[in-house]
Image (tube, rainbow, N blue to C red):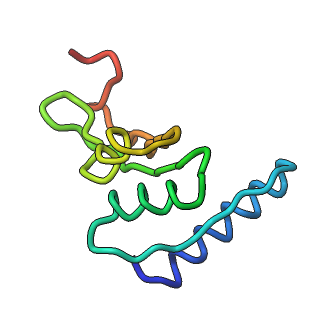
């Protein structure tokens, strides 16, 4: 993702938090391995919560969250909140499908 786009997303998150009456701390990290970099940064800063956006993807009828989110869930020393992208408007995608 281009840096300018990432900065816009972080600014939107800060504005949303401000409108909700709270503050958040954001930072743009650049790393070849996002999971370990995020865990290290969270540990150094004493972070309470990591919020991670994940795309809507299904593999073999199971939701797939990807390597970074999986790493965070296993290794973060704080809470991790995954925010999954909304399901596509597709008749083939159903929450109750087995």
Classify residue 19 by image quadrant: bottom right
Which of the two residues, 91 or 73, is positioned nearer the viewer here? 73
Relative to 25, residue 75 above or below: above
Q: Position of residue 2 (x, y in %)?
A: 42, 82
Q: Position of residue 91 (x, y in %)?
A: 31, 31
Q: Position of residue 32 (x, y in %)?
A: 27, 73
Which of the two residues, 54 or 98, is positioned nearer the viewer here? 54
The residue positioned 58% from the left and 45% from the top of the image is: 49
Horizontal side of residue 11 vs 75, given as left or right: right
Horizontal side of residue 17 vs 47, given as left or right: right
Relative to 19, residue 11 above or below: below
The residue positioned 51% from the left and 78% from the top of the image is: 5
Quarter of the image for the C terminus: give it: top left
Relative to 48, residue 26 above or below: below
Classify residue 16 by image quadrant: bottom right
Q: Position of residue 1 (x, y in %)?
A: 39, 76
Relative to 7, residue 40 above or below: above
């Amino acid at each position: 993702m281009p840096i300018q786009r990432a900065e816009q997303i972080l600014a939107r998150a800060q504005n949303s938090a401000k409108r909700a009456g709270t503050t958040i701390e954001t930072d743009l990290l650049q790393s070849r391995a996002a999971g370990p970099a995020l865990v290290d940064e969270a540990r150094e800063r004493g972070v309470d919560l990591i919020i991670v956006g994940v795309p809507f993807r299904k593999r073999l009828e199971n939701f797939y969250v990807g390597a970074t989110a999986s790493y965070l869930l296993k290794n973060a020393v704080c809470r991790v909140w995954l925010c999954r992208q909304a399901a596509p408007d597709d008749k083939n995608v159903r929450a109750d499908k087995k």
